[in-house]
Amino acid sequence: MRALTRVGCVSILATFSATAAAATPAHYVVFTVGADGRFRADFYTQVELAGTDDGVRSSGNAVAMDADHAERRVAYHAFRDGVDLGERTVEMPKLRAEFAHDPEHGDGRIESFPATQRETSFVLRIPLDAADAVEFTTTKGAKQHFDFAQLAVARNPLPASANMRINFAASASNPANRVDMLLLGDGYTNAQQAQFDADAQVLHDAFFGMTPYKEYASFVNWTTGFVASNQSGADHPPYQAGCTTSACCADAEAQTDILAGQFVDTAFDATFCTAQIHRLVTVNGSKVFTAAAAYPNWDKIIVVVNDPIYGGSGGSFSATTTNASASQIVLHEYGHSFSRLADEYSSPYPGYPACSDISGSAHCEPNVTDQTSAAQVKWSSWFNPSNPIPTPSGHSGVGLFQGARYLASGMYRPVDTQCIMQYLGMPFCPVCAQAYVLRLYTGGWGTPANGIDLIEPGSESPATTATVNYSLGKPQVFQADLLQPTIGSLGVQWYLDGNPIGGANAPSYSFSTNSLTPPTHTLELRVTDQSTLVKPAMAGNLLVHNRIWTIKVTDQIFKDGFQ
């Protein structure tokens, strides 16, 4: 499919393909919250979203958060025909500055730096028939009302590089039943598209070469978008002690920057030394979200910056440079943004909200806890039986190691040092890997809202939405398409009237009966993810998906005799 949309001076050329699926026409609006707490609409267009969701898709979750209590949420009211439909919220992830202590010499200990942004952007994707306006309240209590019809006329062009062109190449899997990851590039000129493709492949291989991402690569649409910049690279503000502007960098790390003093014209304004932290590389979120409108089904965004110096960031989306060690930043940040994992290192983060799995306060993230009673620890199923609880440093396998979530004591992590949430360059520990798998099935990260379905929605034949009239003695095939993990197996079992059918372990089953008794049957297809990355005791029913058909048996031959 090919579409050209022009908004002000911005030209978006999108080329992508997707399997045919139900689509929902929707408003796509990029908003920015300024330092003064006021909102502005930077960009508006109409898009088609895969699926038939009648809710609101935002740049973050549209549901209550279950983990990272430090994230900010912005409230707004949706309106339709002047009627207030009630309050909703949009996630506004904090800007994250986390880096390896000395990546050039293999020291992956994570250092974290508190960082803030003067402006934060987000996206609302609202079905056309669900709302026609939204209203925000500023930090000073003022109401700001945005009418979509007016935005459509005004178009609100961004001050972006003239004739910005985005050429997308997308996966063909159903975006209504996948995690849609969108990779954009900044600092690549028209002549460097092949370089962008190569850099995108490097990042792809790093991501899907790691457990648990590689096991579930089939659950992810990895889509790349080439964005041409006028110049290569990123801005490198030169070192200047006491600097407080974006023209220079007060961080002493900038003294060793071989590109110090370089300022370039790029599509997304990539720059080092955001918030006076040299390695903190950020891009203009408003421009990124505007470009992403060309592939509106995205759930998560990564931006790769064409620059060899080590740096990156996390938050509303992840950014990384092409430095060989920088991809580890993305892997770690995705652990935060998707799997809702906490940092497992203990260096202080003043003011970070507390959590507890003991008291009535907000529960802790899946990979940290303040619980020390072995039987009550949420990951006790993973314990190495030989480990004492709590577990002293130096022991291997999963236990209860003290020091996590920016606290040296009173907070515990699953493993000693073998997890990327503590050391870049490490794998995910078993508890963190499990959290990713469960998150795939839980949802709350985008569309589908309730998570991935092992049975492809809409593939059921016959449809499950109506009773199937069965003619006595004539075989009737029931089937559905299954979503197979890249590595791992599915258990398939058919049930008739609640009883398992022997040998019925394929995605299709031929039903036949010569009896009118009983007149109605229930046929169920039950599919189970048999992943070894998840402990069944911690999965509940998340790994089991099903479809149910109601079958009404009729003596069609007898009826035909009187027609």
Image (cartoon, rainbow, N blue to C red):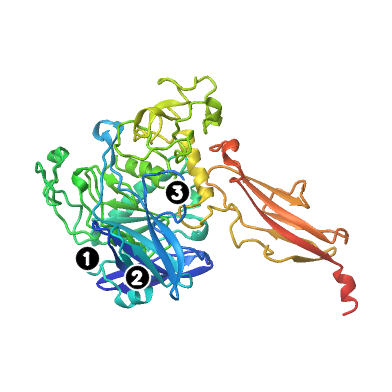
Nearer-the-camera pick, 12 or 47? 47
Q: Nearer the viewer, mark 1 or mark 2?
A: 2
Image coords of residue 32 (percent x, y): 29, 61
Crowd band around label 3 with a 10 angstrom C-alpha radius: few (<14), some (14–19), many (20+): some
Q: Pointer 1: what residue?
A: 161
**Viewport quadrant of the N terminus:** bottom left
Q: Is residue 130 above or below residue 459?
A: below
Would residue 498 be visible to someone looking at this image? yes
> Disc 2 residue type?
Phe
**Viewport quadrant of the C terminus:** bottom right
> Disc 1 residue type?
Ser
Residue furthest bottom as drawn: 563
Identified at 13% across, 42% down, the residue is: 250
Gap in Å between the C-alphas at discs 1 and 2?
26 Å
Whether tag 1 and tag 2 are in contact, CB under 8 A, the answer is no
Would residue 194 be visible to someone looking at this image? no
Q: Pointer 2: what residue?
A: 146
Q: Is residue 267 left or right of residue 393?
A: left
Nearer-the-camera pick, 221 or 155? 155
Image coords of residue 231 (percent x, y): 18, 58
Identified at 45% across, 52% down, the residue is: 445
**Disc with the residue nearer the chain's start (1 vs 2):** 2
**Disc with the residue nearer the chain's start (3 vs 1):** 3
Q: Pointer 3: what residue?
A: 65
**Disc with the residue nearer the chain's start (3 vs 2):** 3
Gap in Å between the C-alphas at discs 3 and 1?
36 Å
Whether tag 3 and tag 1 are in contact, CB under 8 A, the answer is no
Q: Which mark is residue 32?
A: none
Nearer-the-camera pick, 162 or 145? 145
Secondary-structure class at tag 1: loop
Identified at 38% across, 72% down, the residue is: 3
